[in-house]
Image (tube, rainbow, N blue to C red):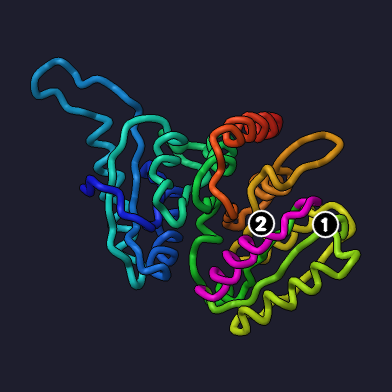
Amino acid sequence: MASAQTPSSVVVGTDGSTAALDAVRWAVREASARRVPLRIVHVAPRHDLDPVFGAPDVDRDYGNAALLAAAAAAAEEPNSPVVEPVYRQGTPESVLRHEAVSASLLVVGSVGIGMLGSLVLGSTAAELAATAPCPVAIIKSYRTAVSTDEHNALPVVAVLAGTDDVWEEWDSIVEAATAEARIRRTSMIIASSDEAGDTDGGLERRITRWQAQTPDVRIDSISQDGALATLAVSLSKAAQLTVVGPPEHDRLPLLGITGRTVHQLLFHSDSPLMICRSHPVGPGLAASTARSTAGVTAAHQ
């Protein structure tokens, strides 16, 4: 077991479930493309050991078995990276957030059993989306996680949400999406709302610049009058991956609800979703945004 966190590793959570193993398999390609280790983390609840000498530690035994299964699944994938199995105690949100501090990507499965069970349907995913210091990828199904010739032909979608001056955030989303498209040797589609503003041609000029910076990745764009969340969900269903910004930059002005597009994608799309930000989230914003996004999540349950 690794005792020290490796900088720039890809971190993936596992609980031994099928969904978690799908997330591990998906994370293999990411770690391999980045040429960094794959850090597989199992989180068990904090507990005191049985005072009886020699009594089994059931949580530890289960965690080791889950890590062994995850490492075996990673080894079966082509070009498997160095694997670092890690056993931790605590809560999934706090442990995975800590593990993400020096990670290039945090990957989690959407459903399962144990501490990571029903991750997308609870508040943990909303909190990680709002507070994780690195991009977060949420893998929702085996069908979309498996690589096939037909699947590999699908594009990567970059969703540009927000009505304020968020060019720097959009730059980071497009940069992440083009990198993912390059890994998959596919094209990219930029999805935006007419409300996001191209009245002065700023977005069109930006797209031209993005294409010039990445000539090896074809970039198409599509916009829709309002209802960006609906457009994003529709496009994601025919995409390998959907990349979107943090929830706090996707706000409905009248209602003050954050993360509308993120939450619509979480609840209505099976495509893998990557949430990225241009700056590390601060503690104050993390706390307030986590409360807000958790409240929106609870409304779906």
Q: Is residue 272 visible?
A: yes
* In the image: residue 122, left or right of residue 11: right
Q: Residue furthest top?
A: 51
Q: Measuring 52% from the left and 51% from the top, which residue is drawn there? A: 136
Crowd rating for badge 1 (residues with CA inside 10 Å; few <14, some 14–19, many 20+): many
Q: Residues within 10 Å of mark 2 (few under 14, many from 20)?
A: many
- Tally of numbered discs: 2
Give the residue displayed 34% in from the left and 72% down from the top: 79
Hey, which quadrant is residue 122 in on the image? top right
Residue behind mark 2: 169
Mark 1 or mark 2, earlier in chain: 2
- Which region shows up in magenta? 162-183
Q: Quadrant of the C terminus?
A: top right
Farthest-out residue, bottom: 215
- For disc 1, the marked residue is 196
**Amino acid type at image mark 2:** Glu
Residue at the image point whose x is 81% and y is 41% from the top: 252
Foreground residue among 281 and 72:
281
Whether 217 is drawn above or below 114: the answer is below
The residue sitting at the left extreme is 53
Q: Any magenta on residue 181?
A: yes
35 in the magenta segment = no
Please give left or right for residue 14 compared with residue 290 in the image.
left
Residue type at the position of mark 1: Ala
Image spot of residue 270 (x, y percent):
62, 54
Q: Secondary structure at mark 1?
A: helix
Left or right, 277 with reference to 98: right
Which secondary structure is most common in the magenta stretch? helix
